[in-house]
Image: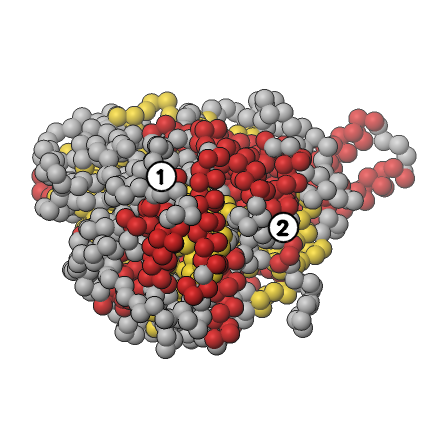
Amino acid sequence: MKRSRLLAVLVGGLFCVVVVSMYRMLELMQGGEPPVGQVNEDLSRLQQKIDKLEHLLSGNNQLVATLRDSLLNHKALWETRGGVNRSLDSAHSLSGCQSVKKMEAGEDGVQLLDIYDLLPFDNPDGGAWKQGFEIRYHGNEWDEQPLELFLVPHSHNDPGWLKTFDGYYQDQTKHILNNMLIKLSEDNRRKMIWAEISYFSKWWNDIDKQKRHLVKRLVEAGQLELVTGGWVMADEANSHYFALLDQLIEGHQWIQKHLGVKPSSGWAVDPFGHSPSMTYLLKGAGLKNMLIQRVHYAVKKHFAQKQTLEFLWRQSWDSTSRSDITCHMMPFYSYDVPHTCGPNPAVCCQFDFHRLPGGRVFCPWRIPPQPITEQNVEERALLLLDQYRQKSRLFRSPVLLVPLGDDFRYVDAREWDDQFINYQRLFDYFDQHPELHIKARFGTLSDYFQALHGHLNSAGTTLPTLQGDFFTYADRDDHYWSGYFTSRPFYKRLDRILEATLRASEILFSLTLAEMRRFHGNGRLSADFPAREHFGLLTEGRRNLGLFQHHDAVTGTGRDPVVVDYGTRLFHSILNLRQVLQSSAHWLILLDKNQYHHDQSKPFLQMDDVISAQDALPQKMTLRLGDQPRPLIIFNPTEQLQSSVISILIDCPDAHVVEAQTGRPMAAQISAVWVELNQASTDSFQLSFIAELPPLSLVVYHVSKATTGSTARAQYTVYRHGSQLAVHAEPFQVSAPQGPEADVPLSLNNKHIHIWSSPKTGLLQKLRMKSGLVRQLQVQFLWYGTRSGFNQDKSGAYLFLPGKEGAQPYPFAQPPLVRISRGPIFSDVTSCFRHFTHTVRLYHLDGHAGRSVEISNMVDIRSEVNRELVMRLRSDVANGNRFYTDLNGFQMQQRRTLDKLPLQANFYPMSSASFLQDSTSRLSLLSAQSQAVAALKPGELEVLLDRRLQQDDNRGLGQGVTDNKLTASLYHLLLEERSGGSQEVGGASVEHLSLLAHLSSLSLSHPPFTMVAMSNSQLPKMQTFLPLRLSLPCDVHLLNLRTLEDPQEAESPSQEAALLLHRKGLDCSAAPEPVPACTWSEHEEVNLDELFSPLRFRSVRRSGLTLLRDDDEEPNSGQHRPPHVARLQPMEISAFRVEIHDSN
């Protein structure tokens, strides 16, 4: 505050000087005309003083705003705590945080963790139903209530797998949909469901108006149902919840625009395991029912024995029924016809009429189907009815669902006829024999669920509730699908880069349009701003990100050319979205908006790095510094004030960085750019400085050349243990440990953390917090091999089948080169091994941003055969057999490492976080990419970094995984003390990330974007863009601000945007130290105008998560709240259709 007062006095003094000068000018004018030269000189001097005053006032306003932000936040913290003497040690010290609680599934509930403890996983032979049991019935079970059967035709169309998306479309998908129009129109009793809107929209663009009208008629008649309505049938293990929801929005918005309907039922027959995060999104999008298939065969058997294959899937953190969604679990091995009519695939295959003799597909059980005739219809109908009845006994109601389809079915017109005509003959026979007590017909998924709910309501029965998730999936024996959690990690990382770029572009584009409308008035945009073109790039980016969420894309389970196709789409969208960011930032930072001119061939701004190809890592550009300062524009895409270290490459070893608007110099550090292990570049240097970035801001910095030796330089210690090493790193100070010093543990520290590393390898060994808490924490690297033996199944893209020897320590013939860097901005230890380079870094930051240890790996295993590289953390945290992983970045799920399961079964997906904890501490690993994680022993946490496998694992791909790349991975490691709510609660417990872990994960997933002004000519005046007065509350995440399409002008932006807010659940047991500069509140109601001030909303309507107009609430409908006050409940995502005010 002293600085603020001093600056105010200086500004006031300068103001007085200017006023006196103006008064003197008036005196001169009144006393006679002075010489022209003197007037010009006085006016020029006055203009300079006014410019300086304007500059100081602007800077003072920004400084005052920052101070006010900090003051208000600390005032709120004071009030929340009830005074300075109240510590954060109690379980309720964080108002609104979610105390650890036991999962309660109700009297008739199912907790999957308990099921796993209960099951023996012994896999006995079940007979005809090999993974199940013999099903018996008497025959009179349906006398009172006839069996009501719905046969649901479907065709599962992968948007890329063995062929590319376009390849499948041209060869198969378009023919399926063309025939669908013809064949469904021939008989109104025929039905079909379709899931993948990516394909459906492409086909829609190819057909004429007459066919489109026919499609609408089939949808309205209930013959064709679009199920789930997502852009793809998404993977549920690796996908982040932003991308899961975004592809759902894209699909639902397309359906609403073109067909005017809303999906009501979900269909997920092929994702390799299922997550409750997806069920939450489906329920929030207005779906009432869903179906899943790929669940561990032992779990399916247990659910079938208990008749709990249909249940209400509830979120683990929800103590009410608000999140419940009706779920149907298919009981058998697959979703193909042999495994859907009943328990005996040899019988069911005889009713897949696509396999009639003479075709290209046959039954492996060597009993072919027969065309249904008058002569055999009775025998065939009774044989099929027996399967239907057996399957029905696994459920609690007489309503039965039987899918009819498989991958890319119904390509040929003949298959449509074979299936529909033969089944209709069987149905007609059933209708003619009421003594069989079955009513069978073709149906859609909604037809089935409507009948199911009707029966449940009339019987007055309810379904059991279930909490938990369905990972890790096994389809047979010990074949656990935990390999795909890591396969193709380069593209899993690229997926998250596109996601972060898309979110940032969406938000900045929406803010730019709102600012333009406010600037021009009357809702007008700047004529030269390519709003429509940029909206097209955003749409393409949404769809390419959505396509990659497909369960054979982000999973890494496509063929090599298909992976290249996906990568090319991701790469092009990243480049295109950068154009949107650059154009939007260009307009926003201009002081004089009339100077804006869009020229894509010569962009005003460019990113500070370049991505040269779909399989290349970003490379920083080297910035040429001269006499004139070079402007840097930094965009903070998060809703929080961030202290971030910005690093750029420059062409000289000394530079000066100032904040352009205030002239305030920034603390900086020059580091070496290593072109070889022991040789630094002589023409490229890394400049790093600390940037204080207000929420969603664009801040302008000036970088200029400085006098030699004026910028702090990192100091290096470089050596290879036990040998001499020549190092070339001018002009940096480089040393090597000598004598006994070479065996002393390496030590680095900042204000919050002290770490020690091995002097031989440079790998982490121990960590101490400022409070004095010490944890042994060793980083190790290990190899997994695969099973040996000619007839043994081996690891592949899907399966992880390690050799019986388990993980083996990473061997090295000579110690790695170790490089220690010490500087005022950051210090780090880098260990250079043959297959990876590992860096542990501490940032010297005052706030919470300095509380975590940054870990980065650069991995290259292209020389290996059938090996998988793992990074293991070994600590003395006494977590027993329990640890926690996130589900899609949305929620945390307790895991239990079980000795009765094979090693590969104890690996789980980690999208963004995992942690171990005991009664005194928690160790969290936060990740910037998805991969497999396990805690095989107490205190251990390991992540699979990359896998190279030479063979197929017999799941249809037909190849191994050998297209490895140089791959980067990034983490934050956070050690926290626990108190208050740290007691064990027994059973399955709900846990959340701590506040610091949430904030650290946010900065890891959404780092700042650095842009450089490229023009060499006179640059226009630029200003900082500050859209928000304050950071959002600590636990409120701005998931997206997504401009919606104009309903009157296709493919153009409207004045409406989708505002998506996620209020996170906070752990109560970890006291945030140091206290972050954001507030939190126990109140669930927030005023959106205050939250986003000075932005103002003209209209706010709460809607469903996919922003369908049918889901929009009327303003104040049944609520006694002011118009823009909304309820944000912990863990919930809230969606609003908003218009930002376009007038001052």
Report whether 491 appears left or right of 724: right
Report whether 908 appears left or right of 500: left
For label 2, count other residues whose C-alpha is less than 10 Å away and answer few (under 14), some (14-19) or many (20+). some
Front position in the image: 1026 or 263: 263
**Residue placed under numbered mark 2 in the picture:** 220
**Residue placed under numbered mark 1 in the picture:** 355
Seen at 52% across and 62% down, the residue is: 450
For label 1, count other residues whose C-alpha is less than 10 Å away and answer few (under 14), some (14-19) or many (20+). many
Asked which quadrant contains residue 1065, the reply is bottom left
- Above or below residue 193? Residue 414 is above
| Percent of width and height locating residue 534 | 61, 34
Seen at 52% across and 57% down, the residue is: 446
Quadrant housing the N terminus: bottom right
Please indicate, yes or no, whether residue 895 appears anywhere in the rendered image: no
- Above or below residue 341? Residue 725 is above
Q: Quick check: marks 1 and 2 in contact, CB under 8 Å?
A: no
Tag 1: amino acid? Arg
Q: Nearer the viewer, mark 1 or mark 2?
A: 1
Front position in the image: 650 or 401: 401
Determine the secondary structure under disc 2: helix
- Above or below residue 1026? Residue 34 is above
| Percent of width and height locating residue 134 | 24, 62
Report whether 676 appears left or right of 611: left
How far apart marks 1 and 2 lie (CA) works out to: 32 Å
Determine the secondary structure under disc 1: helix
Front position in the image: 1056 or 1104: 1104
Front position in the image: 620 or 283: 283
Seen at 17% across and 58% down, the residue is: 124
Please indicate, yes or no, whether residue 178 appears anywhere in the rendered image: yes
Asked which quadrant contains residue 491, the reply is top left
- Is tag 1's residue or tag 2's residue first in the polypeptide sequence? 2
